[in-house]
Image (spheres, helix red, strand yellow):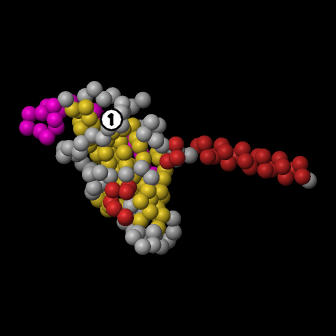
């Protein structure tokens, strides 16, 4: 009887390990030196609320990136920089029926920033035209939004990184900072 229970336990353990390896990347493995690749979903959580916090699950996927050289005549792009745009999908789910707070996505320019791939220096936020639909606005629990973000990246930087920081909204968006590649492997 004990051998049967042990065998069942081992099989259940192997199944759970296999299932865990099939899930998209989780935030614990996500660092500035190990950013998520294009097409990989990173799952994490954020806390919303000022007095009583509610925990919401998020999933962020960089679906594609496009890098273009921009003429600086009349544009706000500084000389020596390329425009990198990223199409991003953002999933937002509450854990409980009572989790109904919306999240302001992309309204703070510091929520989505770019870092240099070589020394992780933050790029200055430059106002540029973003293709429609732009990843911004309020998102409610149970919704997904897909849209574009834009960054000015030095032309010599071949491996820039995008950062999502939920803490930039003050006390209303606590959570883990997440890192994504703005280039194809």
Q: SS class of the residue under badge 1?
A: loop
**Residue count near mark 1 (Cα–Cα under 10 Å), binned few <14, some 14–19, many ≥20:** some
Q: Residue furthest top?
A: 156
Percent x, y of residue 178 = 42, 47
Residue 37 versus residue 160: which sits nearer the camera?
A: 160
Q: Position of residue 22 (x, y in %)?
A: 59, 43
Q: Is residue 1 left or right of residue 104?
A: right
Does 69 lie within the magenta span? yes
Toward which corner of the image does residue 113 lie, by quadrant?
A: top left
Which residue is depicted at the point 44% across and 56% down?
A: 175
The segment highlighted magenta reads 58-79
Nearer to me, 161 or 12? 161
Residue that appears at 42% across and 73% down:
51
Provide the residue designation for mark 1. Answer: 116
Image point (32%, 35%), residue name: 116
Instruction: Identify the residue at image location x=29%, y=51%.
Output: 110
Image position of 2 (left or right of 155): right
- Number of labelled discs? 1
From the viewer's perspective, is residue 94 above or below residue 44? below
Q: Nearer the viewer, residue 66 or 55?
A: 55
Would residue 75 be counted in the magenta stretch?
A: yes
Q: Is residue 143 left or right of residue 73?
A: right
**Residue 53 seen from this side:** yes
**Where residue 155 sits: x, y (%)?**
25, 28
Quadrant holding the C terminus: top left
Residue 182 visible within the image: no
Instruction: Name the outermost residue toward the left.
Output: 74
Residue 109 in the image: above or below residue 114: below
């Amino acid at each position: 009887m004990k051998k049967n229970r042990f065998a069942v336990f081992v099989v259940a353990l192997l199944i759970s390990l296999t299932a865990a390896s099939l899930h998209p990347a989780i935030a614990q493995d996500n660092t500035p030196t190990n950013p998520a690749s294009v097409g990989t979903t990173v799952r994490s959580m954020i806390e919303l609320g000022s007095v009583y916090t509610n925990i919401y699950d998020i999933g962020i996927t960089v679906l594609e990136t496009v890098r273009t050289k921009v003429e600086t005549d009349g544009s706000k792009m500084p000389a020596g920089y390329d425009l990198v745009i990223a199409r991003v999908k953002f999933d937002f789910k509450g854990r409980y029926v009572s989790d109904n707070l919306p999240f302001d996505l992309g309204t703070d320019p510091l929520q989505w920033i770019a870092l240099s791939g070589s020394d992780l220096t933050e790029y200055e936020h430059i106002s540029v035209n973003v293709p429609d639909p732009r990843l911004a606005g309020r998102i409610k629990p149970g919704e997904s939004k897909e849209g574009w973000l834009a960054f000015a990246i030095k032309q010599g930087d071949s491996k820039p990184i995008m950062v999502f920081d939920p803490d930039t909204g003050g006390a209303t968006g606590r959570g883990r900072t997440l890192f994504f590649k703005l280039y194809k492997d």
